[in-house]
Every structure is written in structure tokens, then in C-alpha cells.
Image (spheres, rainbow, N blue to C red):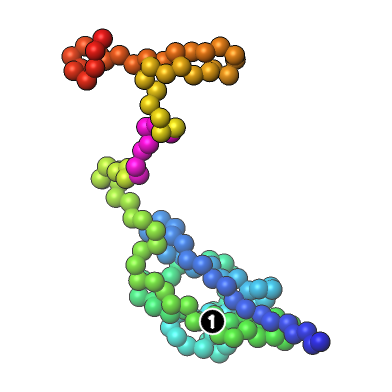
């Protein structure tokens, strides 16, 4: 059995205000160098020191990690063109588009008797409000 140590770079994008941010991580730990212009991170990479803003015209990030004589393969990260997550316009009202269930049990409660859990039965009846023709008072 032969054991080999591998080094790789992981990434994630997230939104911070109006800016798209990129976070890189070497697994296991190591120094990361990256480029935003498609050039080699090994030769002309910027040393990663924390999440960075991704310029709006950037379409590809190249990243590579180095640790204890190991070098990860160059990771090509394609930057999505569309915004991350939903966009919120504070000038527009929020719309709730989830269907609401008014009766979780699926059974009608009109004129039924139910146990209240205390050994006593309680009766529930619904009456129509004045002006409502959907029932009798």
C-alpha cells in the first residue's frame, strides 16, 4: 500500500452588498496564489490573504496551492455572469408566493367534538357572521 498526499483548492462565491466575493481554501492548509486574467498563478499569481472582490469583467479565476513541496493542480473557476441569489429592490413590496394551508389536519372542525387532552371533551361549532349567507345563525 502506498499513501500519497494530495493538495487541492476549494472555492465559494458570495454576495457582500453589491459586490461578488470569492473565498479560496487549500485542503489541507497551504499557500494559495491566484490570477484574475487567465495567466499562470505559479508565475504571476497574487498571494491569497482572504476573500476578495471579483471585478465585474472577470470571467475566470485560476488558483493553485503550495505546501511542503506539494503543488495542487491549477483550478480554473468560471465566474458566473448572473447575480448570486435573489435580487431585492427595496422600492418594491415583497410578495409571498408560498401556498398557505389553513387546516393542517385536513378535516373540518365545524360541529365536531374533540378531546382537549385533559379528559374533558370540548365542542367546537362555527356560526356565520351577520351579513354572511354561507350558513345559518
* Magenta span: chief secondary structure: loop
Give the labeled residue for mark 1.
75
| Residue 61, x across and y down, in percent | 47, 79
Towards the viewer: 110 or 85: 110
State the quadrant of the N terminus. Answer: bottom right
Q: Reply yes or no: does residue 5 show up in magenta.
A: no
Q: Reply yes or no: does residue 100 show up in magenta.
A: yes
- Above/below status of 22 relative to 85: below
Secondary element under disc 1, as helix, strand or loop, is strand
Q: Residue furthest top?
A: 137
- Above/below status of 85 relative to 73: above
Towards the viewer: 70 or 111: 111
How many labels, in total? 1
Q: Quick check: 54 left or right of 29?
A: left
- Above/below status of 98 relative to 42: above
Q: Quadrant of residue 98?
A: top left
Specify the segment rendered in magenta.
98-104
State the quadrant of the C terminus. Answer: top left
Q: Quadrant of residue 108?
A: top left
| Residue 115, x across and y down, in percent | 53, 18
Question: Which residue is rendered at x = 55% and y = 85% of the image?
Answer: 74
Question: Which residue is rendered at x = 18% and y = 14% of the image?
Answer: 131
Question: Which residue is rendered at x = 42% and y = 64% of the image?
Answer: 20
Amino acid at each position: 500500500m502506498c499513501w500519497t498526499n494530495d493538495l487541492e483548492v476549494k472555492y465559494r462565491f458570495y454576495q457582500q452588498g453589491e459586490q461578488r466575493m470569492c473565498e479560496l481554501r487549500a485542503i489541507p492548509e497551504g499557500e494559495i496564489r491566484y490570477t484574475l486574467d487567465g495567466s499562470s498563478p505559479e508565475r504571476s499569481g497574487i498571494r491569497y490573504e482572504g476573500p476578495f472582490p471579483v471585478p465585474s469583467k472577470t470571467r475566470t479565476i485560476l488558483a493553485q496551492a503550495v505546501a511542503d513541496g506539494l503543488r495542487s493542480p491549477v483550478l480554473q473557476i468560471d465566474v458566473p455572469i448572473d447575480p448570486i441569489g435573489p435580487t431585492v429592490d427595496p422600492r418594491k413590496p415583497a410578495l409571498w408566493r408560498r401556498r398557505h394551508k389553513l387546516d393542517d389536519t385536513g378535516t373540518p372542525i365545524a360541529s365536531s367534538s374533540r378531546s382537549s387532552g385533559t379528559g374533558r371533551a370540548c365542542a367546537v361549532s362555527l356560526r356565520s357572521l351577520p351579513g354572511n349567507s354561507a350558513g345559518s345563525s
